[in-house]
Amino acid sequence: MRFDWSALPAHWIPGEPFATHVLNVMHLLLPEGERWFVEVFKEALPLITDERLREEVVGFIGQEAMHASAHQGAQDHLVNHGIDPGPYVRQLEWFFRVRLNRPDGGRRWLVSRLAVIAAVEHMTAFLGQWVLDSHKLDEAKADPTMLDLLRWHGAEEVEHRSVAFDLFMHIDGRFANRVAAMAVAVPFLVWQWSRGVRYLMASDPRTTQKPCWRDIVKAGRRGLVPSTPHLVRSTLRYFKRGYHPSQEGSTSQAVAYLASSPAALAAGQ
């Protein structure tokens, strides 16, 4: 997958630096997280006894590695516009590659990380479905190349949304571990996402706006970022005992976008 960023403006949602940078955090946070997912799933592969699940996990590993690579161009775009994401990204690298990547921690440590990944994948699938549905971004004249990247990535998150959960259930599956992992994952994502937005806004030479929580509420109401009530409802559904990711999102919609994505069509030529 290749995306041409040569004509991408700094604020690719015109006149909306805050909403632009809320979504720009995806280019910084998600790739590092996805690289970590890949390493943890490789550790889990020898424990998988279901051949179909093994095939799905191997496919997941390939998709996540591709996502991380595709977002690198967007990081370079930020640098070209005078915004250096390096300090924030290096902190994420340390956290995921050093603090959370201890393969000698035993089965309990592996189970804990698989549970967290399943929780995070619920959130990324939520984001993926949101961006597929977000016509307000089109109405705001968001850059079409950036929308293609976000929707291509989002469609793949929706398409493989059950893999991490099914792997966790296969290896462990305890409800208490699932609930505890989401209770950890949500505060972590909110913390890191807010840090990323503050960093990008402070580093952006084109704006003096200082972000606050009211900005996220206003942008959510306008449909430029996910709304807080929508996010809360999606998170709460994860705590139901009968939850399964197949109950969230639309596979047919995701597959349809993957078949029509301009970048995907170009890659297939």
Image (cartoon, helix red, strand yellow):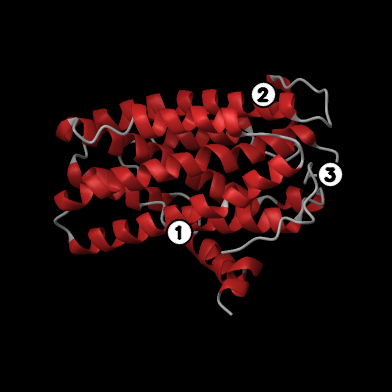
Q: Position of residue 223 (x, y in %)?
A: 72, 41
Q: Is residue 159 above or below residue 123?
A: below
Q: Is residue 250 above or below residue 198?
A: below
Badge 1: how crowded within 10 Å, few (<14), some, or many (20+)?
A: many
Q: Is residue 163 above or below residue 168?
A: below
Badge 3: how crowded within 10 Å, few (<14), some, or many (20+)?
A: some
In this view, the mark in front (2 or 1): 2
Left or right of 269? Residue 121 is left
At x 74%, y 58%, the residue is 144
Q: Earlier in the sequence, mark 2 or mark 1?
A: 1
Q: Which quarter of the figure has residue 24?
A: top right
Q: Earlier in the sequence, mark 3 or mark 2?
A: 3
Which mark, residue 176? none
Query: Is residue 239 visible to the viewer in this orientation of the structure?
Result: no
Q: Tell me the residue that label 1 is attached to.
A: 159
In this view, the mark in front (3 or 2): 2
Q: Which quarter of the figure has residue 89?
A: top right
Amino acid on which the number 1 mark rests in the picture: Glu
Badge 2: how crowded within 10 Å, few (<14), some, or many (20+)?
A: some
Q: Tell me the residue that label 3 is attached to.
A: 14
Amino acid on which the number 2 mark rests in the picture: Arg
Q: Earlier in the sequence, mark 3 or mark 1?
A: 3
Nearer to us in this view, 158 or 63: 63
Q: Marks 3 and 2, how far apart in space?
A: 19 Å
Q: Marks 2 and 1, how far apart in space?
A: 31 Å
Amino acid on which the number 3 mark rests in the picture: Pro
Tag 1's secondary structure?
helix
Q: Tell me the residue that label 2 is attached to.
A: 198
CB within 8 Å, label 2 to label 1: no
At x 61%, y 74%, the residue is 265
Query: Is residue 54 visible to the viewer in this orientation of the structure?
Result: yes
